[in-house]
Amino acid sequence: MTTDPQDTGFRLKGWHVFAGFAGAFSVIIGVNIALAVNAVKTFPGLEVENGYIASQTFDARRDAQQALGWDVAARLDAGRLILTINDAKGYPVRVNALDVTLGRPTNVSEDVVPEFDWDGTAYVAEETLNPGNWDLWIKARAEDGTPFEQRLELRMPF
């Protein structure tokens, strides 16, 4: 009897195949679980508690907000966050109430509430932002009591 020099004596059995499949799927399932847990942990939450109820007044709120004719913009200049609100004629608007949250679009861990001061033409706050995408969630109230809400995007270069 002659022996094959490449024969190592190893024979692939059913349990070897099962162990390979089980190991591969364990890795896939483990990674999926880790990603799902991380996604749920960093989810910022709901915009409104009940979307149906919020939708019932959406058109009226949008029309009232558009009737104000405000043009809102934000920029970062030398460590100062500048929020400008201008009326339809281009004049600066000073609001009755201003509530602004600055944060990342997908994570609440870096959210801050800037302390704005009115300088006569715009609202100014001292802020230093890391590179990347940022959102400004603005809630304001006009002189006549009309609520105004808008989200502005800021992009800080890397």
Image (tube, grey):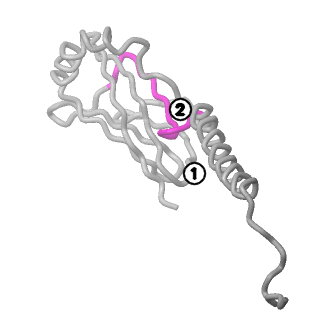
Q: Which residue is mark 2?
A: 114
Residue 94 at x, y percent in the picture: 33, 25
Which amino acid is tagged 1? Asn
Q: Residue at x 46, y 51 (%)?
A: 77
Residue 50 at x, y percent in the picture: 39, 12
Residue 100 located within the stretch drawn in magenta? yes
Residue 82 at x, y percent in the picture: 42, 41
Look at the image and tell me in which quarter the N terminus lies: bottom right
Mark closer to the observer (2, 1):
1
Residue 73 at x, y percent in the picture: 32, 40
Give above or below for 61 relative to 21. above
Q: Which residues are magenta?
A: 94-108
Q: Residue at x 23, y 30 (%)?
A: 70
Q: Residue at x 81, y 71 (%)?
A: 10
Say which of 6 and 150 sits in front: 6
Q: Which residue is mark 1?
A: 130
Say which of 140 and 149 sits in front: 149
Q: Residue at x 69, y 57 (%)?
A: 17
Q: Residues within 10 Å of mark 2 (few under 14, many from 20)?
A: some
